[in-house]
Image: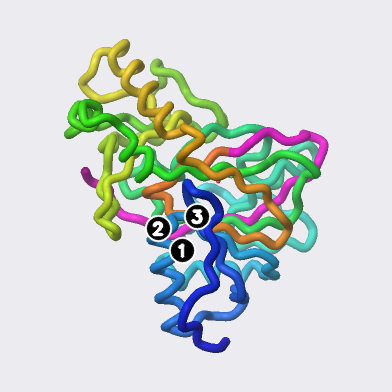
Amino acid sequence: MATMLKLDTRPLSPAIGAEIRGLDLARPFDAPTLALVRQAWLDHAILLFRDQKLTLDQQVAFATQFGTVGERSRPPERRPEGVDFHPAIMLISNIRENGKPIGSLPDGEMWFHHDMSYVEAPYRGTMLYAIELPSVGGNTKFANMYKAYDSLTARTKERIRGLKAMHVYDYGTAEQVGRDVDLSKVKHHAQSIAITHPLSGRKALYVNRLMTLWIEGMAAKESDRLLSELFDAAEDPSVYYEHVWRVGDLMMWDNWCSTHARTDFPAHERRLLRRCTITGQPLHE
Ligand code: SIN
C-alpha cells in the first residue's frame, strides 16, 4: 500500500467519530499510515472503514497493529458453515442452529455500555465487522464520554471526584442485573466514575446504564439519583452518533472514552458481525 501522508477523514457526526476512506484493511499498513490511523483513533474515538473485504485472519491481523488482541475466555460459539473459529474473534449474531445462537449478544436492543468495564483492565478497543444485516434496525449508537464529562456542571464534577462505582455483568442476560446481585457469582469491578484516558490525558465519564449498579460508599437512593443524572448526560443525543451498518463496514471504537448501544431489530432477520478486541489496562481518575 502506498504511504499516506494525510488521511481522507470525514466526521461522522458533531458528537463523535470519523470515516476514513481509501484504505484497504486486508493489507498491513506501513508505519507512517499506521501512525496516522492511531492518531485519528485517539482524536475521534470511533473510526469507520467502509467496503472492506476481510477474512477472519485478515481482521485479526488488522487488529494486531493496534495492540494485543484479546482472546475469548469462554468456550467458543458454534460456527456456521464457512465461518472458521479463531480464539480472538467473537461472533455477534442472532443466527441460530438447532435453536441455539451461533454467536454472543444475539437479540434485540442493548443499553449503552463500555465493553468489559466490569474487569480490572477494560479493553482499549473493539473492532466490529459487518457480514449480514437485518433490513431495518440493529444500528449501533456510539457516545462520546469526553463530551459527557465536559457537559457536567462544575458542582457535579466536584461531587464525583474520588468516587468509584460498581460495574457488574452477568453473561446470562443482556439486561442490567439488580442491586441484589450476588457478586460472588458474576464478574464485577469498581471503577472511578471519571477516568483520565491513559493516552490522551483527557477526562472521560466512565459509567454506563447497563453495567454500573451503584456508587461505592453512598446510600442507595442518593447513588441511584446521581447515577441517573450521569446516565442522562452520557446518553444525551448531543453526545452520540447512531451508525446504520452496511455490509463490509468495519468500525473500531475506543472503549475508554466511548460507550455503545444497539437498537432493536426484527428477530426473524439474520444479523452477523465479527468482533475483535484490543486488551487494555487498569483505569484511574
Ligand atoms: C456490542 O455491544 O459489542 C454489540 C454491538 C452491536 O451488536 O451492534
The amino acid pointed to by label 2 is Thr
Taking 273 as reference, is 233 left or right?
left
Q: Residues within 10 Å of mark 2 (few under 14, many from 20)?
A: some
Under mark 3, the amino acid is Gly
Identified at 38% across, 61% down, the residue is 42
- Front label number (2 vs 3): 3
Location of residue 118 in the rendering, given as x and y in whole percent from the top left corner: 38, 38
Quadrant containing ligand 1 reads: top right
115 lies left or right of 243: left
Question: At which x and y percent is residue 27?
Answer: 59, 80
Q: Identify the magenta region.
A: 262-285
Query: In the picture, residue 149 is in which quadrant?
Result: top left
- Position of residue 24 relative to residue 282, above or below, is below
Q: Nearer the viewer, residue 234 or 131?
A: 234
Q: Quadrant of residue 211?
A: top left
Characterize the local packing of mark 1: few (<14), some (14-19) or many (20 or more) Cα atoms within 10 angstroms: many
Does the CB distance between marks 2 and 1 fall below 8 Å? Answer: yes
Q: Secondary structure at mark 2?
A: loop
Task: Give the label, 1 or 3, closer to the camera.
Answer: 3
Q: Which residue is mark 1?
A: 69
- Give the labeled residue for mark 2: 279
Amino acid type indicated by mark 1: Val
Q: Is residue 268 magenta?
A: yes
> Disc 1 and disc 3: Cα gap in Å?
22 Å
Alpha-carbon neighbours of circle 3 within 10 Å: few (<14), some, or many (≥20)?
many
Q: Position of residue 99 (x, y in %)?
A: 78, 36
Q: Secondary structure at mark 1?
A: loop
Cβ atoms at labels 1 and 3 below 8 Å apart:
no
Q: Which mark is residue 17?
A: 3
